[in-house]
Amino acid sequence: MGFQLWISPNTGIRRKGTTFKELQGIFVVNITTKFIYEPIYCCRLDDVAIDVRKTLEDRDFDVIGVINENEDVFGYALREELEDYEVSKFTHKIELENIVSDSTPIIQLLNILSVKSYSFVVESNKIVGIVTRADINKPIVRIYIFGIISLFELHLNFWINEYHKHESWKDKITENRFNETNELFSKRKGNNEELTLLECLQFCDKRDILKNTNDFIGQFNFSKKAFERLLKDTEKIRNELAHSQNSIIANLDWDRFVTTVSNIESFLHYSEEEVEEKVRLLNKN
């Protein structure tokens, strides 16, 4: 596919909407915690704790906010701790480190939720909601993650083409995998003159090609094991997204999920710098 997606073959100018910075900018500037947090359900200090626990069980909530006489949330209680007595006996103070602004970008929120599985959300200096790891499954977050994974795969295609001119990557996969790819290519080709054999490779094939391309591994400072792990974990997330599963982190623990997303972002940052450098050299010549 070469530069065609990123660079106009006629002008040599980078096409709009093709950079990771543009994709990320949308989510940093416009898509924030405001769009995914839930209003916090609350009780009072003198409420009967066991009754509150029953309500939380009915609603399938794990945390409840505790309000003062001014109706302001100042503390919280955990469903698993509520027994007899009043809620005051089980109330925890909301610490600063467990608070996020409603303007916190989704990208930053992923890392914040690595420390604790939920955070309280502040809007106009008042605690108004709660955001949990489960909220990462909401459509707006899925769109961003699907976007960076799609861009990631396009960059993988680019580097396969760069290091394996004229489809010389064929010897990097098994004969059986190549035959399956060729069969898929024949089925999909139809009237699509621009479709390439590379675009019919499975994610695992691209992983095996680049994992065994030493110049690529060296350029991006990967070990073969680390690169393979990144692509396997990325594929798990992509499959959950593609099949519209209820949870996109069902097959990865939270820390590994966040690390995978972060590593994809880091790869894209560096890969785009390398692409831009190639563009500069191309225009210079």
Image (cartoon, rainbow, N blue to C red):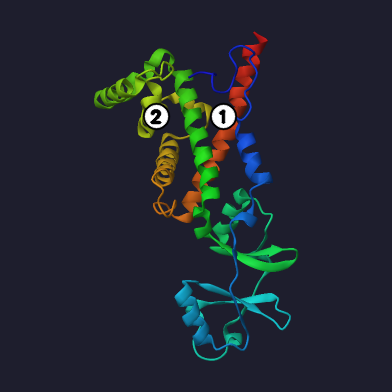
Q: Is residue 177 above or below residue 31?
A: above
Q: Residue furthest left?
A: 176
Q: Position of residue 256 (x, y in %)?
A: 47, 50
Q: Position of residue 85 (x, y in %)?
A: 54, 91
The residue nearer to you, when weighing 102 against 254, is 102
Residue at x 49% of width, y 79% of height: 55
Identity, as a three-letter code, of the amino acid under mark 1: Ser
Q: Position of residue 46 (x, y in %)?
A: 62, 89
Identity, as a three-letter code, of the amino acid under mark 2: Lys
Lateral position of residue 66 relative to residue 48, left or right: right
Per the rendering, the mark at residue 271 is 1
- N-terminal of the two: label 2 or label 1? 2
Q: Position of residue 32 (x, y in %)?
A: 64, 52
Lateral position of residue 174 relative to residue 228, left or right: left
Q: Is residue 71 above or below residue 132?
A: below
Per the rendering, the mark at residue 132 is none
Quarter occupied by residue 124: bottom right
Residue at x 60% of width, y 48% of height: 107
Quarter occupied by residue 178: top left
Q: How many marks?
A: 2
Element carrying mark 2 = helix
Q: Quadrant of the C terminus?
A: top right
Q: Is residue 116 above or below residue 239?
A: below
Per the rendering, the mark at residue 206 is 2
Question: Mark 2 Cα within 10 Å, few/some/many (few <14, many 20+)?
Answer: many
Lateral position of residue 242 relative to residue 9, left or right: left
Residue at x 59% of width, y 25% of height: 274
Inter-mark Cα distance, 2 to 1: 16 Å
Q: Is residue 245 above or below residue 201?
A: below
Question: Mark 1 Cα within 10 Å, few/some/many (few <14, many 20+)?
Answer: many
The residue nearer to you, when weighing 38 against 281, is 38
Quarter occupied by residue 283: top right
